[in-house]
Amino acid sequence: MTLWGGRFTQSLDTLAWALNSSLPVDQQMAFQDVEGSVAWAKAIHKAGILSDEEHASISAGLDTVRNEFASGEFIFQPSDEDIHTAVERRLSELIGVAAGKLHTGRSRNDQVATDFRLWMLNKIPELHSTLIVLQNALVEQAELAGETIMPGYTHLQRAQPILLGHWWLSHYWALKRDIERLQDLTKRVSVLPLGSGAL
């Protein structure tokens, strides 16, 4: 399902299609795309755009798509340009014409921004945990270093003797600042762009 190219007089070359496809990267955001669609269906149902029956059908279809992703049974097609078209195609196969109403009032741009923010919110705790493990390893190395002396450098030249343990701990504190940045990032990405349109 191509979302663009309506003015082209011939089909796109397969190499250009492969270059333009974001699906290999997008697949990492499959669950977030479904979650964003679930939230959007709820919003447009509440706004009166979807009937109760359409909302129930879309919700059930999205549950099936989510389960197919989880079990590895979801089959991507060559025509799937990105994760959004893949989910929409499969939803259409499952529930028919009602699937087309899901995109009402939603632009591809705000859908991408929503997916990416949800993905980041999911990954930030993983990265935070990894940084804590690394910090602990640095403290361990600093303790093992004991009173070992090494040269401290500035401007690529030896400047003064320092403890190896202090050098290890300098990286600990740099990672602490990274953890603080992740905490700030959590606040920054916890803003819902869904419904903001194409701009």
Image (spheres, rainbow, N blue to C red):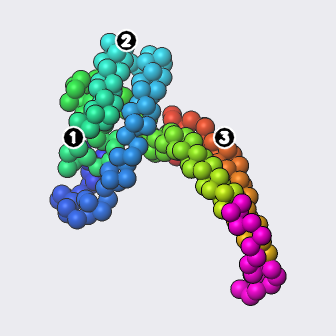
Residue designated by label 3: 187
Name the element at disc 1: loop
Spot occupied by residue 4 in the image (x, y as percentages of width and height): 31, 50
Name the residue rendered at 28%, 41% in the picture. 86
Q: Residue at x 29, y 26 (%)?
A: 64
The kind of residue tagged 1 is Ile
* Sequence-earlier tag: 2 or 3: 2
Can residue 184 be seen in this snapshot?
A: yes
Among the 4 quarters of the image, the one containing residue 32: top left
Q: Secondary structure at mark 3?
A: helix
Discs 1/2, front: 1
Closer to the camera, 161 or 18? 161
Number of other residues with Cα within 10 Å of mark 3, as a class: few under 14, some 14 to 19, many 20 or more:
few
Q: In front: 33, or 102?
A: 33
Element type where label 2 sits in the image: helix
What amino acid does circle 2 point to?
A: Asp
Q: CA distance from mark 2 to mark 3?
A: 34 Å
Residue at label 1? Answer: 75
| Highlighted range, magenta | 142-161
On residue 52, which mark appears? 2
Q: Is residue 133 left or right of residue 58?
A: right
Residue 51 quadrant: top left
Q: Is residue 67 left or right of residue 104?
A: left
Q: Which residue is drawn at the image coordinates 18% and 57% (left, top)?
A: 11
Is residue 165 in sight in this rendering?
no
Q: Which comes sooner in the sequence, label 3 or label 1? A: 1
Residue 87, image x and y in percent?
31, 36
Image vertical order of residue 21 relative to residue 147, above or below: above
Question: Distance of mark 1 from mark 2, alpha carbons?
Answer: 29 Å
Mark 3 → mark 1, Cα distance in angstroms: 35 Å
Pinpoint residue 140: horizontal percent, then vertical percent: 66, 57
Q: Residues within 10 Å of mark 2 (few under 14, many from 20)?
A: few
